[in-house]
């Protein structure tokens, strides 16, 4: 009986049902787009990390020499050179190869590119004087772009599943010149730290969307029931139970909301797994398992949150309900909607702003060379030692060993550079992670021996995502890195790489951050779009409910000849004023929430001054809300039957 009544009510109010359905369908699309992209990306990278355990760059051997040690997953015979795209020149690894993950290989028909977010399918790219059509642009966790052509280079990059890493290393030491060799031991698969950061970062946007949608849904449902208080009193006086009354007023919302949400699940997952929506191609396939488990919880949350107003229905007294006179909606309802919507969207935006700011970091060097102690000793600049896999307060990180006078003293944001052997400087990200400040002591495990150091400074130098430790140079360690400031960093890099050194410029380091930003922009813009749609849904529903609950008032206004423009101005004042106030109230907490979300990836710094970046688009949003308000008021007032309303 309640279900039949709810369906009959939906047939009478088709327009409202369609709007609710579309809003929840779009909400589902946004949530499942985000979850689908996360799930597919996680599955792809997880698969990639388990199909190989050794990465290397060598000269003097070929793929055929390595197959007896295991299965080669990806390989590239390359030389380092320049490519031109869109009038700009980029450094890249250029050569012949085949990548099983992602599926890309050299072909005479054009060029596939990897780790090159600026390139899109169909672009023209110039390589060594030849122009190629980009056949596909794939995301790949490497700091330098890869361009696959038919030209075979002198260097060999390999990612493989190795059966005996020790035997492979011994073979390479005898027969090859090794530039890079990394073994991912059992329990440490490649890229899982980065993947975990991406997952947590993007999932925070999902929670912003979900929280906004559910809060707005509760607000609208309460407004719906409160506007029908007298009708609730009549039904109670007739002896109908609270459960039936609740179903009568809420079941229509619930049915349409769940149907709309269910409709958007599969398309959202499919869209989220489409590589082009992430800015570059990802070899993704739909992962339904990851989003569906969240969708079940979301549907349950929708049912629970929509059902909470049942408590309000059960507390309504029959006599008081019959005396109840509907009140005109206050500014507070609209203000609450806009505050929640702007808080969610601005938090996502500020998180992205915080990470983007770090892509423009400065450093006291512009060339970073890595090589053997003999090669590093010949270079100008500052010599630095390095150890990976060491422990600081139980957390595995990287440690760099500097002289007591160092150019990196310029990177300090707090404290001083070390002067004693038991003093340390810590990067800002690791300091935040460990909750360490200047003056605190830390436990450092060096080559299995635990030592105690006092932190005397905090640096914002960019190493290991700002999570590294700087210690005084030790006698047992020979420098394997060199940092220099030169006038022509690209030229110096090319010269040093020709000598077999691994070299980074500041542009290379910035590119690493910018490449990761490609993954983050899509969920941020998704949050902003979905929260806008949710706020539009709330505006429509609140206006509809007020006119419906006070139809005699508005019918009387029409009957005495007051034009609809009067009502439009009334609602425009409420909507635009609440949008302005709500957006400005949301900015301070949004900066703080954005700071916490952004710090999942990198140690961002945000201030209220960054809010100036969000101010220019706000007037456009206010105009959009105003136009939508006028449209809704005209539609609702146009359907108001004056005679019927006055007779009611």
Image (cartoon, rainbow, N blue to C red):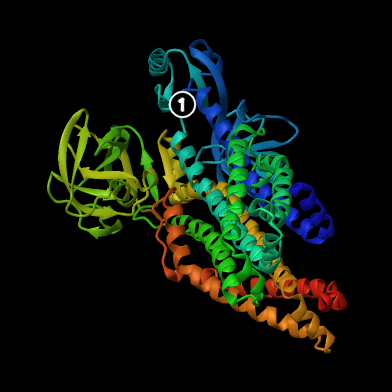
Q: Is residue 628 left or right of residue 591?
A: right
Q: Which residue is mark 1?
A: 56
Name the image quarter holding residue 334.
Answer: bottom right
**130 up-or-down from 560: above or below:** above
Single out the residue that lies furthest toward the top. Answer: 68
Q: Is residue 256 left or right of residue 433?
A: right
Is residue 521 visible in the rendered image? The answer is no
Q: Alpha-carbon neighbours of circle 1 within 10 Å: few (<14), some, or many (≥20)?
A: some
**228 up-or-down from 580: above or below:** above
Name the image quarter holding residue 140.
Answer: top right
Please tell me which residue lies in front, 36 or 581. Answer: 581
| Residue sitting at x 62%, y 69% | 319
Please tell me which residue lies in front, 69 or 229. Answer: 229
**612 up-or-down from 355: above or below:** below
Residue 74 spot, x, y in % from top left = 57, 25
Please tell me which residue lies in front, 182 or 583. Answer: 583
| Residue sitting at x 76%, y 75% | 551
Residue 304 spot, x, y in % from top left = 58, 48
| Residue sitting at x 50%, y 23% | 52
Please tell me which residue lies in front, 550 or 61. Answer: 550
Q: Secondary structure at mark 1?
A: strand
Is residue 102 visible in the rendered image? The answer is yes
How many marks on residues?
1
Residue 535 spot, x, y in % from top left = 64, 64
Q: Quadrant of the C terminus?
A: bottom right
Residue 437 spot, x, y in % from top left = 23, 54
């Amino acid at each position: 009986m309640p279900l039949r009544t709810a369906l009959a009510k939906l047939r009478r109010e088709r327009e409202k049902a369609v709007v609710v359905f579309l809003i929840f369908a779009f909400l589902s699309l946004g949530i499942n787009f985000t979850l689908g992209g996360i799930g597919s990306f996680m599955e792809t990278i997880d698969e990639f990390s388990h199909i190989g355990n050794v990465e290397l760059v060598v000269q003097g051997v070929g793929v055929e020499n390595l197959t007896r040690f295991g299965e080669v997953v990806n390989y590239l015979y390359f030389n380092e050179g320049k490519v031109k795209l869109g009038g700009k020149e980029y450094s890249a690894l250029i050569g012949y190869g085949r990548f099983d993950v992602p599926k890309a290989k050299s072909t005479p028909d054009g060029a596939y590119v990897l780790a090159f977010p600026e390139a899109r399918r169909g672009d023209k790219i110039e390589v060594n004087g030849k122009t190629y059509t980009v056949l596909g642009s794939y995301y790949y966790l490497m700091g330098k772009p890869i361009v696959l052509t038919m030209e075979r280079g002198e260097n060999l990059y390999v990612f493989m599943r190795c059966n005996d890493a020790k035997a492979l290393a011994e073979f390479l030491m005898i027969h090859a010149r090794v530039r890079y060799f990394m073994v991912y031991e059992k329990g440490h698969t490649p890229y899982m730290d980065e993947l975990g950061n991406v997952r947590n970062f993007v999932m925070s946007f999902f929670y912003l969307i979900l929280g906004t949608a559910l809060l707005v849904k509760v607000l609208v449902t309460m407004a719906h029931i409160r506007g029908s208080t007298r009708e609730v009193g009549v039904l109670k006086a007739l002896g109908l139970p609270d459960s039936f009354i609740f179903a009568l007023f809420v079941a229509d919302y619930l049915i349409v909301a769940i149907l709309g949400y269910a409709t958007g699940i599969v398309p959202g997952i499919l869209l989220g797994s489409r590589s082009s929506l992430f800015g570059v191609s990802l070899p993704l396939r739909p992962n339904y398992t990851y989003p569906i488990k969240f969708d079940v919880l979301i549907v349950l949350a929708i049912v629970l949150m929509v059902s909470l107003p049942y408590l309000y229905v059960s507390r309504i007294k029959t006599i008081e309900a019959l005396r109840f006179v509907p009140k005109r909606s206050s500014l507070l309802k609209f203000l609450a909607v806009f505050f929640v919507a702007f808080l969610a969207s601005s938090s996502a935006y500020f998180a992205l702003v915080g990470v983007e700011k770090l892509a423009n970091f400065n450093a006291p060097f512009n060339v970073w060379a890595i090589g053997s102690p003999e090669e590093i000793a010949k270079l100008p600049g500052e010599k630095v030692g390095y150890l990976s896999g060491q422990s600081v307060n139980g957390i595995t990180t990287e440690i760099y060993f500097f002289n007591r006078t160092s150019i990196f003293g310029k990177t300090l944001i707090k404290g001083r550079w070390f002067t004693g052997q038991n003093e340390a400087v810590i990067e800002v990200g690791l300091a935040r992670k460990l909750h360490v400040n200047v003056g605190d002591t830390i436990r450092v495990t060096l080559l299995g021996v635990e030592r105690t150091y006092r932190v005397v400074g905090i640096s914002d130098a960019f190493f290991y995502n700002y999570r590294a430790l700087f210690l005084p140079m030790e006698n047992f360690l020979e420098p394997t890195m060199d940092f220099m400031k030169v006038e022509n960093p690209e030229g110096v890099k090319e010269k040093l790489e020709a000598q077999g050194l691994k070299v980074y410029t500041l542009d290379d380091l910035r590119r690493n951050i910018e490449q990761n930003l490609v993954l983050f922009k899509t969920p941020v813009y998704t949050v902003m779009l979905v929260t806008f749609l949710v706020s539009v849904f709330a505006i429509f529903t609140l206006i509809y409910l007020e006119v419906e609950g006070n139809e005699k008032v508005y019918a009387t206004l029409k009957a005495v000849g007051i034009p609809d423009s009067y009502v439009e101005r009334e609602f425009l004042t409420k909507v635009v004023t609440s949008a302005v106030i709500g957006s400005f109230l949301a900015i301070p907490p949004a900066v703080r929430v954005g700071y916490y979300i952004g710090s999942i990836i990198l140690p961002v710094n945000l201030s209220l001054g960054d809010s100036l970046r969000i101010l220019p688009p706000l007037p456009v949003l206010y105009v959009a809300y105003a136009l939508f308000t006028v449209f809704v008021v005209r539609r609702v007032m146009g359907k108001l039957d004056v005679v019927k309303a006055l007779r009611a």
